[in-house]
Image (spheres, rainbow, N blue to C red):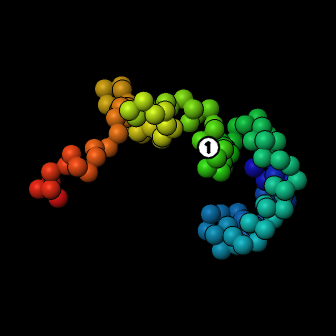
Amino acid sequence: MDALAGCPELVEDTRYATPEARAENVVALRTLLQAAFRKASAAQWLAAMAKAGVPAGPINTVAEGIRSPEARAIPVDLDGVEMMLPESPFVLDGMRNRITNSAPKWANIPMKSF
């Protein structure tokens, strides 16, 4: 990762040799890595990390996340109104629970339920 980020000298730097040392020097490490990451676009870093076998993914804004292919693959129809909502992370018997109707109207909930 250090060579990938353009900082091969970090490999030999004892301030970053162990998780504990990195934690103690996190401010300095963050400063070095932020400067290195500014040298290329997010897309370029993601491609380089994928090529190097480093698991990575983009950090999207809410708008980018909603427009992502992953979010678009989750259609939800609530009473004829198409909405984009996150899918349930739970899988039971190989199936994900789908949202198929809207929440009940307040008038339809008996007060003794509260």
Residue 95 or residue 98, whichever sits in front: 98
112 versus 69 height, above or below: below
Name the image quarter holding residue 51.
top right
| Nearer to me, 104 or 92 | 104
| Residue 32: image location, x then y, percent | 81, 65
Q: Residue at x 63, y 37 (%)?
A: 68
Identify the residue at the far front of this view. 107
Report x, y in % for residue 106: 26, 51
- The answer to whether 109 appears left or right of 53 in the picture is left
Number of labels in the image equals 1
Visible residue check, residue 104: yes
Residue drawn at x 78%, y 47% is 42
Residue beneath label 1, please? 65
Instruction: Give the residue at x 61% y 43%.
Output: 65
Residue 31 in which image quadrant: bottom right
Above or below — where is 93 with respect to 49? above
Judge from the rendering whether residue 19 lies leftward or rightward of residue 44; answer left or right. Answer: left
Using residue 35 as the reference point, say whether residue 106 is left or right of it.
left
- Looking at the rendered structure, the kind of residue marked 1 is Gly
Q: Which residue is drawn at 75% across and 49% down?
A: 1
Circle 1: is it few (<14), some (14-19), or many (20+) Cα within 10 Å?
A: some
The correct choice, above or below, for 7 with respect to 23 in the image is: above
Which element type, helix, strand or loop, lies under badge 1? helix
Q: Measured from the top left, where is residue 103 in percent x and y?
A: 32, 43
Residue 88's x, y, as percent? 41, 39
